[in-house]
Amino acid sequence: MNVLTDNFATFARGFLGTVELTVYASLLALLLGFLMASFRVAPVASFRMFGTVWVTVLRNTPLTLLFFAVLLGLPRFGLVLPFQVFAVIALGCYTSAFICEALRAGINTVPRGQGEAARSLGMSFGQTLGVVVLPQAFRAVIPPIGSTLIALAKNSAIAGAFSVTELLGTYKTLSELGYNIVWTFVWIAVGYLIITLAISALFNLMERKWGIAR
Amino acid sequence: MAVDPLIELRDVNKYFGELHVLRDIGLTVGKGEVVVVIGPSGSGKSTLCRTINRLETIQSGTILLDGRPLPEEGRALARLRAEVGMVFQSFNLFAHKTVLQNVSLAQTKVRRRGRDDADRRSLELLERVGLAAHAGMYPAQLSGGQQQRVAIARALAMEPKALLFDEPTSALDPEMINEVLEVMRQLARDGMTMVVVTHEMGFARSAAHRVVFMADGRVVEDRAPEEFFTAPRSERARDFLSKILKH
């Protein structure tokens, strides 16, 4: 039971590691997901193709495999970065595929005529998407994006296997010190709950503020 | 009215997959002319209207606007669309913007007018369509007829050379149709070039300079309204008119 109080510093380091991974990878995933969603609805065929390939490849690759590919593959091409950065890249790219599809689903909820009206007024593709379509799509995608980011927070545990400091990895240190593994895992689970419930709360708040009024 | 042509279609063909929806369409609309396009549903009249600002692409033929061919996708096309206003059957007002923002948005984004300048102009236009008092409301709070009048004001805000109307009154309750037609009649009197796809025969009779009758993707008749309604030449038009004018 005193595994938490004795090793608070270890837990805190792991917890912060997971929070950092989640926050940075989320930002990357949102950015890339947004970009890929724009590609997938663009009037230029090659852009659409690129977006489709991006989503298909990343969504259908097991995340662990992707970690291997990024952490072991990229250094072979001369790209050497801290493992934590690699982990953010792997997690961010992987999740961006899901964000992209959630956004695209949201874009599809906006009636076609909205985009047509914007274009008929002379707005560019970027303006149509940015000023007219996405603000309306945004309301519909708050819940699925929340779910995707919660999944990302939990997926970040894989980074622990690649010696990135994060919450799940703390169990190794603690079990070597002889602490009860069950209680260690209970506290780790509580740590994840704090993060995922925080994300839920944030998205609930956003939904109440901007969600579709019915 | 043989004046400068503003919109010219030459041998325009369009397919939706196998379906040949526009067949060798030739049509010229002069500056200040009001052309009403009528015909049975599926005749291609809405598609025709939408090809003029390239919301629908065509497979062959040429479309000229003010003597210049319609550009491909890109900035030039966007510029051209700003010159040709469009009013849709389902209004398509931006649902997340107020009435005033709907009219001002493209002025600031496309015409690069300052916000105050755009809003001032928007209010003038809303005044003109009788809706200045509703400037702060959202589209969902307005009736269909009011929404369509806002949509007309929104199109006018770009100071277009021509306006396209794609069945502007077909989604309206009967009692709201007139308020929209009245705004359109006023525009016609002010000399706006208009292409109007509609089922409102009264409007065609009173406001149009020419009536274009379409069936099965072809322009079957293109004549002055009085001649067309009193003595249609083609069997197809006689059949169509007998069906809609009987009741």
Image (spheres, coloured by chain):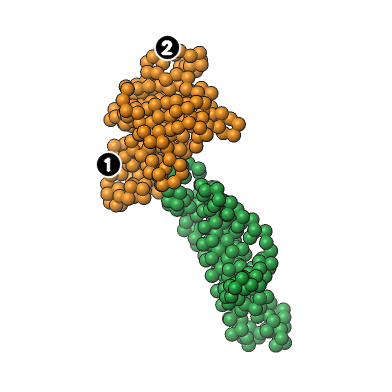
Chain colours: A green, B orange
Where A62 falls versus B244 (above or below)? below
- Circle 2 sits on which residue? B231
Under circle 2, the secondary element is loop
Say which of A152 and B231 sits in front. Answer: B231
Residue shown at 58%/51% (left/top)?
Answer: A49
Say which of A98 and A122 sits in front. Answer: A122
- For the N terminus of chain B, the image quarter is top left
x then y, percent, for residue A85? 57, 73
**Dot 2 falls on which chain?**
B
User: What is the count of numbered marks?
Assistant: 2
Q: Earlier in the sequence, mark 2 or mark 1?
A: 1
Q: Are marks 2 and 1 in contact (CB under 8 Å)?
A: no
Mark sitting on residue A174: none
Label 2 to label 1, Cα distance in Å? Answer: 42 Å
Instruction: Please state which of the two labelled residues, at mark 2 or mark 1, is closer to the viewer.
Output: 2
Say which of B81 and A76 sits in front. Answer: A76
Residue shown at 38%/36% (left/top)?
Answer: B68
x then y, percent, for residue A80? 59, 75
Instruction: Give the amino acid at mark 1.
Output: Glu
x then y, percent, for residue B121? 28, 44
Instruction: Give the amino acid at mark 2.
Output: Ala
Under circle 1, the secondary element is helix
**Dot 1 falls on which chain?**
B
